[in-house]
Image (cartoon, rainbow, N blue to C red):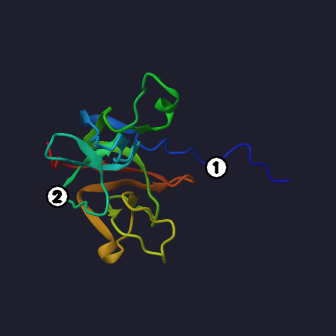
Amino acid sequence: MPGSAIGIELNLGYPGSVSRSIDTIITPRPVKSVVTEGNETQPSILFGEPVILNTDNTYSRFGASGTAATFAGIAVREVKQATDYYAGCGSYLPGEIMDVIERGSVTVKCNAGTPTSGGKVYVRTAVNTSIPTGVVGQFEAEADGTNTVEITNARWKTGKKDSNNVAELTILTRVNP
């Protein structure tokens, strides 16, 4: 009877974890907050998600309108002081100070494709029903026409992806310092 208690290889980590700290630049800024009629309209940003830098010096999620030129980095995981029940949910809420890696290596979710060492990095900007694992605003290892944007200053590091779709990428240069 085959056992499954001992895995074949270790997981690569959690999305948003800094994986190599030698050449890392991390910058903290607030997450954009827009309150309309008493309700927050901006989404939270998960650890390991790409972000853009806004003109008001805040970060927002990289979404459908994101481009390689607006890419600011990746939200990195940190140990946060729990001030309420939702503080430990693995994300940054609007108005919180968020740490973003602008240069260096970090683990992220790769929802589609298989990363290759030195391979191109893409972020999905539009839904494609033929790729059900693709999530708008998250990373992929293969192009999907106009539905993805190539992040020209990033490359997949090791070419490995674990069973949780976590892979390591490196941001080579800063775009929006």
Quadrant of the rendering where the C terminus is positioned = top left
* Above-or-below relation of 16 to 126: above
Query: Of 95 and 59, which appears nearest the observer?
Result: 95
Going 50% across and 65% down the picture, which residue do you hit? 133
Q: What residue sits right under mark 1 in the picture?
A: 8
Q: Earlier in the sequence, mark 1 or mark 2?
A: 1
Going 35% across and 48% down the picture, which residue do you hit? 41
Instruction: Determine the residue located farthest toward the front in the rendered image.
Output: 37
Pointer 1 with pointer 2, Cβ within 8 A? no
> Marks 1 and 2: which is nearer the front?
2
* Above-or-below relation of 3 to 85: below
User: Mark 2: which amino acid?
Assistant: Ala
Q: What residue sits right under mark 2 in the picture?
A: 69
Query: Of 97 and 9, which appears nearest the observer?
Result: 97
As helix, strand or loop, the secondary structure at mark 2 comes to: loop
Q: State the separation of the CA atoms marked 1 and 2.
A: 40 Å
Q: Quadrant of residue 33?
A: top left
The spot of residue 23 in percent (x, y) is 24, 37
User: Mark 1: which amino acid?
Assistant: Ile
